[in-house]
Amino acid sequence: MADCALELSFDERSATAVEDQWRALRFLGLPSQLDHRGMTNAPHLSLVVASAIPEDVVARAREFFAAALPIRLDVRGLIAFGAGSRVTLAHLSEPPRAVVDEVTALRQASPLVRHPVWTPHVTLGRRIPRDRLGEAMAAVDARGGEPAPDVLVADRLRWWDPATATIDVLAQA
């Protein structure tokens, strides 16, 4: 069974900037999130990913983010996850302190959370060959002559429920 998720998605400008980076990776023949064909594929920042998220956690997230959106996320650089021959390339993102505190509480209240430690990031490409990581980083750092974004603006809280194959917008700016 797939994991359900609470995610922040982005305003049009921010989503386009990330999608441009996905295209830059694909142009070089590198794995890109553009290759992900699932219905949930859109630039986003995962908050809680778990095999089940309690209804009261979802309600708490809706209430908090309804008041907090839009949220400015400072991009602090690129990060690579993975220990093998292939890595995930992502933007390391820094949310405001109040968001970090709330997400920490939401995750602590979700006993089946997939990763116990939250590393706020926006994925650009998965399974990138480690020996092409430098090339991938250069491509997303200056896609088509445009500088990489230094700020992303989240304007929606999404809920992905694989049991019903639905994506619901729970809160929006």
Image (tube, grey):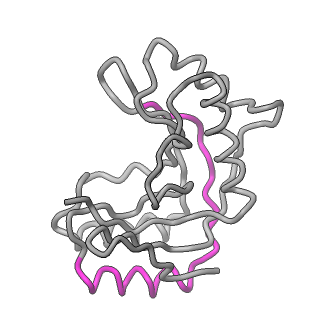
Q: Of 102 and 53, which appears nearest the observer?
A: 53
Figure check: 117 above or below 127? below
Q: Horizontal and vertical percent for residue 86?
A: 37, 23
Residue visible at 61% across and 30% down in the picture: 25
Farthest right residue? Answer: 145
Q: Give the residue at x 34% y 17%.
A: 85
Q: Is residue 134 left or right of residue 130?
A: right
Which residue is at 48% across, 68% downward?
Answer: 99
Q: Is residue 103 left or right of residue 148?
A: left
Q: From this viewpoint, which residue is outermost toward the top?
A: 131
Examine the rendered structure and indicate whether residue 80 appears above or below residue 148. Answer: above
Could you tell whether 75 is left or right of 108 in the image?
right
In which quarter of the view is residue 104 placed? bottom left
User: Which percent across, then down, holds residue 38?
Assistant: 43, 54
- Quadrant where the C terminus sits is bottom right
User: Is 62 colored magenta in this rendering?
Assistant: yes
Q: Is residue 72 magenta?
A: yes
- Image location (x, y in percent) of residue 58: 34, 81
Q: Residue furthest left?
A: 111
- Left/right placement of residue 28 relative to residue 116 reads right
Q: What span is colored magenta in the figure? A: 54-80
Number of numbered tags placed on the structure image: 0
x and y, in percent, of residue 42 in the image: 55, 57
Above or below, 143 relative to 119: above
Query: Between 150 and 146, which is closer to the camera in this rendering?
Result: 146
